[in-house]
Amino acid sequence: MPQRTMQEFREERLEGQERVLALDHLGIKRFFALDTAAYRDGDLPARTKELCGLAASMVLRCNDCIDYHIEQCVKHDWTKEEIVEAFNVALIVGGSIVIPHLRHATATLEQLLAEQPEE
Amino acid sequence: MPQRTMQEFREERLEGQERVLALDHLGIKRFFALDTAAYRDGDLPARTKELCGLAASMVLRCNDCIDYHIEQCVKHDWTKEEIVEAFNVALIVGGSIVIPHLRHATATLEQLLAEQPEE
Amino acid sequence: MPQRTMQEFREERLEGQERVLALDHLGIKRFFALDTAAYRDGDLPARTKELCGLAASMVLRCNDCIDYHIEQCVKHDWTKEEIVEAFNVALIVGGSIVIPHLRHATATLEQLLAEQPEE
Amino acid sequence: MPQRTMQEFREERLEGQERVLALDHLGIKRFFALDTAAYRDGDLPARTKELCGLAASMVLRCNDCIDYHIEQCVKHDWTKEEIVEAFNVALIVGGSIVIPHLRHATATLEQLLAEQPEE
Amino acid sequence: MPQRTMQEFREERLEGQERVLALDHLGIKRFFALDTAAYRDGDLPARTKELCGLAASMVLRCNDCIDYHIEQCVKHDWTKEEIVEAFNVALIVGGSIVIPHLRHATATLEQLLAEQPEE
Amino acid sequence: MPQRTMQEFREERLEGQERVLALDHLGIKRFFALDTAAYRDGDLPARTKELCGLAASMVLRCNDCIDYHIEQCVKHDWTKEEIVEAFNVALIVGGSIVIPHLRHATATLEQLLAEQPEE
């Protein structure tokens, strides 16, 4: 059973987000807005926050969150080597229980880099 | 890859429970009995306990447990709006790492409500 | 080393909340407002949400959060027996690793009930 | 959706490990070596460490880690009954949130025992 | 602030257990009985189960549970070197976030060994 | 009960680290070396890794780890405002259960900034 493609993930995630927002619960909608805002440029640039978000997602072991933040990190021009350094910090903090997620994250990173246009 | 249907979940869960009980381990069987008993009417009604079980399952981020408790909550006549309020408490307690499970829970809730007979 | 009193907890918590808010970070202040709003009367009454918050706090094993929600539950007139039922749900969901927090929660509950005026 | 077979798991895991090691990050490679070394015979025999690793994996609720350690436990000649005792310790420590993983672990254990040659 | 002594821990724990049992909740009392039973000699000897319980407690990062299981492991004649091997498995599984608990566990182990009669 | 001072934390931590290393377990010593190495300048600068380590420690809710990484972040010249942005990312990822640790982290940050020489 090969890992879902990033395109499948994006579509499922988008559909899921829309389903949640359609619940039309004010608290949930505000939380979603806060979540988006947390990663905008501020006293820290967005790209640094995305790397922190990636490390946090890995130690909490959530593949959807990991995939989302890797995609954002690639968009913000972190290189493969830099992202792998963040993987390593998360592995050391979180231990071997993180390894299955590291396997997932590595496959995601390679998919995303393969999607990038040649320079 | 669409989410499993609730019917698939029920069958897989039932088969899995039977496989575990067939191990015939006294401690495990007693724990299963205690687990069932914990949600029976007592000083708190069963329906209130199921809502607490749902909130606990969401912050611990276990989709099988979430699906089971949403189904129980629907059976105990909590309305969609009330269940969504419990989702919101879990989201605020547990943070954005809960969001993938909130997406799952929302799809489950909608499936279960669609199964309900028209009144 | 006896457990801190609820009065000590209230003062330390209040001082800590003020210190955090004094950081004057918009995202943090908005999250605090959302957190407060999540437990207000809505489609579910505040008292039901507080009981869900208590169960969630116990399985996540956070004594400060447990103490806060027990106090709210007592204020919302949940009886000792009802709160203990929520303890039991959390114990069954979270297992023996919850027991040290159950010991803490029990001492907190007894302190709070002893503070209540005679009726 | 039946559970993946152990053969599928072994192949996916191996491919994933190779992909991670191909990142060629010194810290990650050293952690992998330390992880392997942690389960070698030492002051505790490897088989006792594998049983501890299984209990730890179950309470942390990671199916990949659970499958890996059950396979090692079977290779180290722990009997079905002994492994189920470790399942029970993990269930009691970790609570009902472990049950979906116990269902998975039971199916894995049965697959592995069915693969064993008749004696 | 030096770490509490094991004698203080034992007294606080005993007092806390009695307070919980005095709540007289049938589900809680049954869970406590199941918890005790889980570590009795069975298909696995009690001492092996205690070592598994220690590893599980360390990765879940609960100092009270860690102290309790180290004490049981010492009573069951696991040597210092063997217990330290279990510490290492937990450290590798759980990562650097376990280190503060490893510091605590080491101090506990040394206290307990110092209490042992000379042979 | 006021929060321990950073000076007390540093001394207790140092003493604890020495006690663990004195166990003289090769695996543990190697893990400690890997942990130190993970935060050295590499493809990512040490200061970025420390910020990621802080975010990971906050969502995993470990005060000792939080204090250690805040101290490193201050040493690496992250400003108060930048560190608070990392607090906010962790709060959003981890939810209200992180708040008690945010109160702790804020007090630590203020102590550390008060220790800094005037410029």
Image (cartoon, coloured by chain):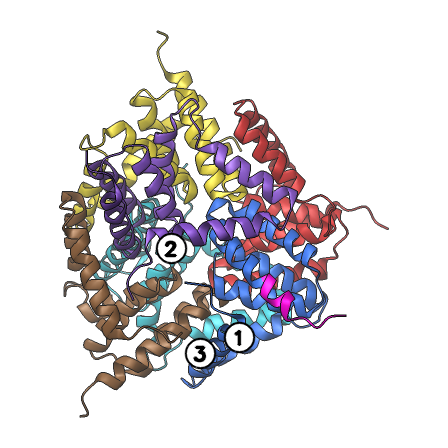
Chain colours: A red, B yellow, C purple, D cyan, E brown, F blue
Query: Which of labels 1 and 3 is toward the front?
Result: 1
Classify residue E40 by image quadrant.
bottom left
Identify the secondary structure beneath mark 2: helix
Q: Amino acid at mark 2?
A: Glu
Q: Amino acid at mark 1?
A: Gln
Relative horizontal placement of residue E72, taking residue A18 as reference (left or right): left
Query: Which of labels 1 and 2 is toward the front?
Result: 2
Q: Residues within 10 Å of mark 2 (few under 14, many from 20)?
A: few
Relative horizontal placement of residue F73, taking residue F60 as reference (left or right): right
Residue drawn 46% across the image and 56% down it:
D10
> Numbered disc 3: what chain?
F
> Numbered disc 1: what chain?
F
Residue D99 position in % (x across, y down): 31, 46
Q: Are marks 1 and 2 on the same chain?
A: no
Alpha carbon distance from label 1 to label 2:
24 Å
Alpha carbon distance from label 1 to label 3:
14 Å
Classify residue D79 by image quadrant.
bottom left
Q: Amino acid at mark 3?
A: Gly
- Which residue position holds label 1? F7
- Which residue position holds label 2? C8
